[in-house]
Image (tube, coloured by chain):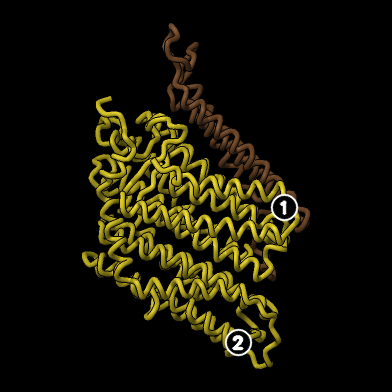
Amino acid sequence: MSHWIIAPVVLPALVAAFMIILFRGRLMLQRLTSVAAVLALNAVALALLMSATTTGAQAYFLGDWLAPFGIVLVLDRLSALMVALGAGLGFLTVIYAMGSGWDAKGAHFHPLLQFLLMGINGAFLTGDAFNLFVFFEVLLIASYGLMVHGGGANRLRAGLKYIAFNLLGSALFLFALGLLYAITGTLNLADLAVKLPELPEGDAALLRVAAVLLLLVFAIKGALVPLQLWLPGTYANAPGVVAAMFAVMTKVGAYAMMRFGTLVFPMDLPATNLLYASLLLPAGLATLGIGAIGTLGATTLPRLAAFAGIASMGTVFVAIAHFTPAATSAALYYIVHSTLATALIFLVADLISRRRAHSGLQDCPPVAQPGLMGALFLAASIALAGMPPLSGFVGKLLILDAWRDHAFAVWSAILVSSFLMILGLARAGSNLFWKPVEAAPKAKAEPLALLATLGLVAALVALTVLGGPVTDWLAGTAEALHDPAGYLAANRLPTGG
Amino acid sequence: MEALFAMAIGLLTAVGIYLMLRLRTYPVILGLTFLSYGVNLFLFASGRLAVNAAPIIGYPQPYADPLPQALVLTAIVISFGMTAVIMIMAIGGYLEAGHDRVDLDDAQEPEA
């Protein structure tokens, strides 16, 4: 049993506490510690990724209490991928925050970011439903602090709304967990997967209620229509660098939906069979549509980025809703792409907003460094709209291919929404860069911030160039998700009891 | 006892949802608190209601399920902390904006 599985949770927690106690108010020391910690986290995440690829699913029994009585962390290819994705984005976020000076606008940016990483990693790794709730709360409470980082009346009021929405989500989560426990007497995911098929028929209705409540909770996290209302206001008011990091938080919702939809409530479970698929598809298509229309109507640059992020979550949910290995592997590819692309557009929006008089898309003040900013905006737009040559195109192609059987509805929704996004992003780009007539002002040189942004572009290019090997690996991951024998075996549940 | 318990959960949840739909932040926070009380009772009931039963195996009487009690304890601690956070945020928002309405209609994004 490898103790490294718990490292992605323990490392950020210790570093964050350490920074708050010893380096309070000493920004330079906090920055150094934070960079060292995310680098170490990346190394651990890569090692776990290798280990999950070679040996398959492995469980870590906390306190050596056996499942299903104790809490387990389970490392499989999916959780390793998501941890690595979060760690990579965390590294670029820290670099950008240092380069742009965002982390100097409040006292605790770096500790809060470490706590956020702890919650995200924990949510990806845990094999226990109640523990998932606890890690959701950990990442949320850190995100509340990060969201209002820098202060200001509007940011605080938008933060309040964000917290209220998520507290409601937490209450729903607890109702769902209570129901699940009342029906089955267990909250271990693998144990649930074993026990649910043997459930007496009378409990099927209760089980469906619990499944839908869980779906609602994950929909709030993943900004699925009609529960996306919190996202534009939150992300547009949050500091740009924080919004970029939040790009991986919506993926926690998508991850949880995939995990529950394949492990706990798979299609062949009689009580729920097509429940998740039939609810997710229309909601995902609506999310895609609302995101695309939102990019047309957005009045400020961060809001445009937020709606583009919603549209890409819609694409992810449409892909997940098919619940077949091919579609799941397309969804995984698009999750990686969407995290990088959404983070990129938020960083670019932040860079541009700080190079002009305001962040609005009307009455167009000039932008400093128009050539470089324009190129970055173009790259982000191409990625989000899903045009060649970046990975959004590959991802959308894979999803279209997987949805061949319902080509008319799904293909037209994805293609029309892509067209609308091209229009919205092109309109914003021409307003930003071609309307201003005055000369461009001088810009501060921010080498680290630019480096982090270019790092995201490089990651998108790498995802495109390495599309073949990546999709092969993801196909294996999707197979393992849809046939969770390895996951169940790793939990070493007692048999015959 | 079951009927009384169920009615208490329903009442707390209904009050919570009603208050959450109000325009001012303070009733919204109160509503969230009521909702979390309702949830806590609900979690408690998920281990079945038992009278005069200790959560210890090996006692002469039938024993109560200890896990929901642990879950409720965790949920109480978390909702307590979250209420404190949202309270501070509400006070901060009120002091900065001069009013405590929940809607953001008049708001513009802050400049970076």
Shade representing chain B: brown
**Where is the N terminus of chain A found, in terms of image quarters?**
top left
Seen in the picture, residue A240 relative to A171 is either above or below; the reply is below
Q: Element under label 1? A: loop
Residue A280 badge: none
Residue A370 image label: 2
3D distance between C-alphas at marks 1 and 2: 38 Å
- Quick check: do tags 1 and 2 share a chain? yes
Look at chain A in the picture and name its colour: yellow
Residue at 59% from the left image edge and 38% from the top image edge: B78
Q: Where is residue A183 in the image (x, y as percent from the top left)?
A: 36, 30
In primary-sequence order, the first of circles 1 and 2 is 1
Identify the residue under disc 1: A23
* Residue A336 position (above or below residue A165): below
* CB contact under 8 Å: marks 1 and 2: no
Residue A225 x/y as whole percent:
44, 58
**Residue pictured at 72% horizontal, 52% vertical:** A23
Chain of the residue displaying label 2: A
Kindly report which numbered mark, 1 or 2, lies closer to the viewer in this rendering: 1
Q: Which one is nearer the viewer's eye here, B33 or A388?
A: A388
Instruction: Read off the chain for label 1.
Output: A
| Residue A379 visible in the snapshot | yes
At label 1, the amino acid type is: Phe
Q: Quadrant of the C terminus of chain A?
A: top left
- Residue type at numbered disc 2: Pro
From the viewer's perspective, is B100 left or right of A141?
right
Q: Position of residue A277 (x, y in %)?
A: 30, 53
